Image: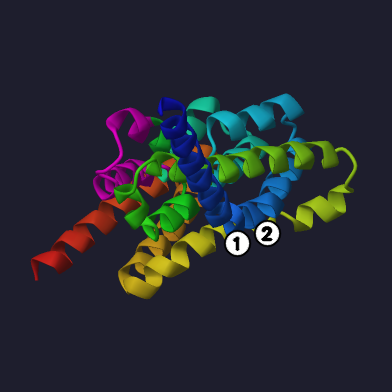
Amino acid sequence: MDSVISNKQTTEKMKMMRSGLAAGVPITLGYFPIAITYGVLASQSGISLLELTAMSILVYAGAAQFMGTNMFAIGAGGIEIVFATFVLNFRHFVMSLSFANRTKGITNSWKLPLSLGLTDESFSVASLHTEKAKQEHSSYFYGALMIAAYASWIIGSFIGGVLGDVIPSSLSQSMGIALYAMFIALLIPSVKNEVKYGFIALIAMICNYVFTYYVALAEGWAIVCSTLLASFIGMMIMRRSEGK
C-alpha cells in the first residue's frame, strides 16, 4: 500500500515537473540567444570565461549583467558596478514578495529557493499559472520552470564566452545593440501602462549626460547617480499623481 502511494506521488511530481518544463520553453528559447550575446560581449570586454559564467550562475540577471559588462568595459570600479546593479535589480525584492503572496499554498521552505530563481520573464509566466499553487506538489512545477530558464541562461553564457574568442570584433560590436534592446524591452510595457515611466527614463538620460559631461563624474558613478536621482524624482512624481 505504501509503495502504491509512493509511486502515485512520484508520478504526480514528475507530471508537475514536465508541466513546468513545458511552461518554461518560451523563456529558454528567448534566453539562449541573449545569453550568447552576453557571453560574447563579456568575453571581448576582457572578462574570462570562468568569470562571465560565474556571473550568470551567481547574479543571474540579464539586464544587470549587460550593464555590469558595459561598465567594466568603460573602466568602472567594482563598487560602482555592484551599486548600480543593486539599484537596477531592486525590483526583484518586490517580485519575490508578490510571488510569495500569490503562492500561499507552497511551504516557506520552498518559497526562498524559488524566489532566487525569479526573473522578469519567469515571474510573468509563474503569474499566469497561480492556480498551480493550489495543487499538490506545485513547488515542482515552479521549480522546473525556473531551473529550465536558469540552465538555458548559464549554458548560453558559456557558449557565448567560448565564441567570444572566435567571432570577429566587428561582428560582436554590432551585438552590443542587445544591451539597449533589453532595456527598451523592460521599459516599453511600463510606458504602455503609465507614460510617466517614460518621462522618468528621460530624466535619467538627461541626468547621466549632465553628470558625465558637465559635472565630469566617472561614467560608472554617473550611471549610479543618475539612476538614484531619477528614481527619487520618479517616486515624487508617482506619489503626487496618486495623491491627486
Classify residue 138 by image quadrant: top left
Asked whether 19 or 199 is in front, the reply is: 19
**Location of mark 2 (residue):** 177
**Residue found farthest to the left:** 243
Q: Quadrant of the N terminus?
A: top left
Horizontal side, residue 162 vs residue 240: left or right: right
Q: What residue is shown at x 63% (from left), y 34% (from top)?
A: 75
Asked whether 66 or 13 is in front, the reply is: 13
Amino acid found under the numbered disc labelled 2: Ile
State the extent of the magenta-drawn residues as a range: 89-112
Q: Position of residue 206 (x, y in %)?
A: 44, 60
Query: Residue 105, which numbered label?
Result: none
Amino acid found under the numbered disc labelled 1: Ala
Query: Residue 181, which numbered label?
Result: 1
Do labels 1 and 2 touch, CB within 8 Å? yes
Majority secondary structure in the magenta region: helix
Check the image and report above or below for 150 versus 77: below
Asked whether 14 or 73 is in front, the reply is: 14
Residue 218 in sight in this render: no
Distance in Å between CA atoms under marks 1 and 2: 6 Å
Q: Position of residue 180 (x, y in %)?
A: 59, 59
Element under disc 2: helix
Q: Position of residue 126 (x, y in %)?
A: 41, 53
